[in-house]
Amino acid sequence: AQSVTQLGSHVSVSEGALVLLRCNYSSSVPPYLFWYVQYPNQGLQLLLKYTTGATLVKGINGFEAEFKKSETSFHLTKPSAHMSDAAEYFCAVTNTGGFKTIFGAGTRLFVKA
Amino acid sequence: DGGITQSPKYLFRKEGQNVTLSCEQNLNHDAMYWYRQDPGQGLRLIYYSQIVNDFQKGDIAEGYSVSREKKESFPLTVTSAQKNPTAFYLCASSIGGPSNTEAFFGQGTRLTVV
């Protein structure tokens, strides 16, 4: 069975600091991996996705993530945090031929001035 | 503009009442989904539909029902059998099965039992 674990329900960084949100997955077949962002009382918006090919994936708003098969990880990073990055972030996984997307529990990012 | 519209944004329900949450999309997507979101639990799948007139239970379907009579519409009914319905409900759609295609989400409906 597939699963997603996001380490840390809350992460706090200072404005301008590196953002690192951790995601580990389990899947018996090659996964497709996604990061979504959710602002308060809104739906989710896709940040980036990994399907095949290059393992370093760039997304919107300066975010990127690297698929590391050996570590079963797909951590999300951004070199310099902005106040507008404060939101909740969800990692998600599906697999080839699968239909259900499994979401992690989410990590809330706080950005301090 | 293409997108997914959920209504209402806020909904209050009395104990023992059924309520229906609306979800409409104009993205021409075949697949549609309903998720429930509770603090600290991420998103849990209630029902999904791969095509018109067909739908399947997700992980937490008890106390919920859906219909898919039109491609654009996938309403969710929260019945009185749902013991703890207070939550944020999200509707989503995708081109086909989720596989390598992302889901597009509505703005959500916050349901509160009073």
Image (spheres, coloured by chain):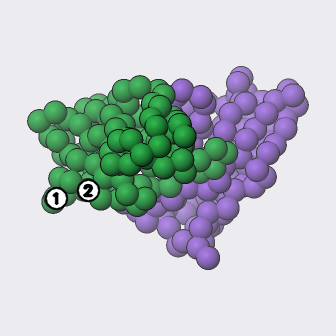
Chain colours: A green, B purple
Q: Nearer the viewer, residue A73 or A12?
A: A12
Disc 2, SS: strand
List x then y, in percent, for residue B114: 87, 28
Looking at the image, which residue is at 31% across and 52% down?
A64
Tag 2: amino acid: Val
Residues tagged 2 and 1 counted as in contact (Cβ below 8 A): yes
Looking at the image, which residue is at 52% across and 28% down?
B41
Q: Residue furthest left?
A: A70
List x then y, in percent, for residue B1: 61, 76
For label 1, the crowd category at 10 Å Cα-Cα, with few meaning under 14, some 14 to 19 and many 20 or more, is: few
Q: CA distance from mark 2 to mark 1?
A: 7 Å
Q: Nearer the viewer, residue B50 or A95?
A: A95
Q: Which mark is residue B14?
A: none
Can you say whether A50 is above or below A68 in the image? below
Which quadrant would the N terminus of chain A be assigned to in this image? Answer: top left
Q: Which mark is residue A57?
A: 2
For label 2, the crowd category at 10 Å Cα-Cα, with few meaning under 14, some 14 to 19 and many 20 or more, is: some
List x then y, in percent, for residue B33: 54, 50
Tell me if A31 is positioned left or right of A80 in this view: left
Looking at the image, which residue is at 51% across and 59% down?
B104
Circles 2 and 1 on the same subunit: yes
Q: Residue furthest top?
A: B83
Which quadrant would the C terminus of chain A be assigned to in this image? Answer: top right
Tell me if B62 is positioned left or right of B49 in this view: right
Residue at which label 1 appears: A54
Q: Chain of mark 1?
A: A
List x then y, in percent, for residue B73: 65, 62
